Amino acid sequence: MTTSTPLAGLAARLAETACVDAPFKLANGTQLDAYFDEYRLAADPTLLRDVAAAMANIVPDDAQVLAGIELGGVPLVVALSAATGLPAVFLRRQPKGYGSHRQIEGAAIDGRRTVLVDDVVRSGGQLLHMTRILRIAGAPVADALCVLERPLGGRGLLGDQRVTLHSLLAEADLPSPRNGDAA
């Protein structure tokens, strides 16, 4: 990506708003010096709208439903649904412990090409888990979208399971010095 593209301007805005230079501990125990804060992205309505508009360009043409993973993927999928006109579903990591007891909420997915949506992809484990949940529920899943891809094996892991990862930005697209350790 060159600095003259509109995506470069969006990357700079994302880095300024959502990349935080502070310690951050991943679920696997890894400690980072900086991270991507999806809540800061979601809290900025103009940036969220602009990210969704840019992501709309990478939604596969045959997509029928967008699926946001709790919690970072939910505001993204709502904004992306509004930008594309595609219905949305919301995925919990675990089924709800009361009420409906559902793990998948929102639009019908049975037999409909469903595209996963998340904020950051690192190893791809969370997306792979949610792919399995959706496939068991009857949704064909062949694509996943993210705002930021870190080169930690996620693309390969998903590819092994016939899921193509479409990332708006790669870690290297973020302006330095933030591209060294962002989660």
Image (cartoon, rainbow, N blue to C red):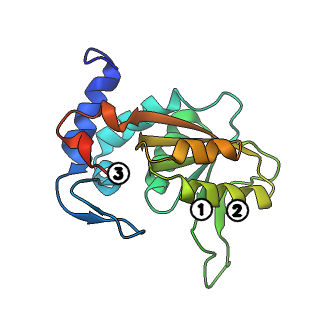
Residue under the point 49% across and 53% down: 123
Residue 109 located left or right of residue 38: right
Q: Nearer the viewer, mark 2 or mark 1?
A: 2
SS type, badge 3: helix
The answer to whether marks 2 and 1 mark residues whose Cβ atoms lie closer than 8 Å is: yes
Which of the 4 quarters of the picture holds residue 164?
top right
Q: Amino acid at mark 1?
A: Leu
The numbered dot on residue 42 is 3
Give the class, few, some or many, for how many residues have Cα within 10 Å of label 1's Cα (few <14, many ≥20): many
Name the residue that disc number 2 marks: 133
Q: Amino acid at mark 3?
A: Ala
SS type, badge 1: strand
Q: Earlier in the sequence, mark 3 or mark 1?
A: 3
| Residue 163 coordinates in the image, percent (x, y) | 66, 42
Q: 145 or 161: nearer the eye? A: 161
Give the class, few, some or many, for how many residues have Cα within 10 Å of label 3's Cα (few <14, many ≥20): many
Give the class, few, some or many, for how many residues have Cα within 10 Å of label 2's Cα (few <14, many ≥20): some
Q: 130 or 155: nearer the eye? A: 155
| Residue 37 coordinates in the image, percent (x, y) | 30, 54
Residue under the point 74% across and 54% down: 108
Q: 180 or 42: nearer the eye? A: 180
Image quarter in which the N terminus is found: top left
Q: Earlier in the sequence, mark 2 or mark 3?
A: 3
- Classify 40 as above or below 8: below
The numbered dot on residue 35 is none
Name the residue that disc number 1 marks: 91
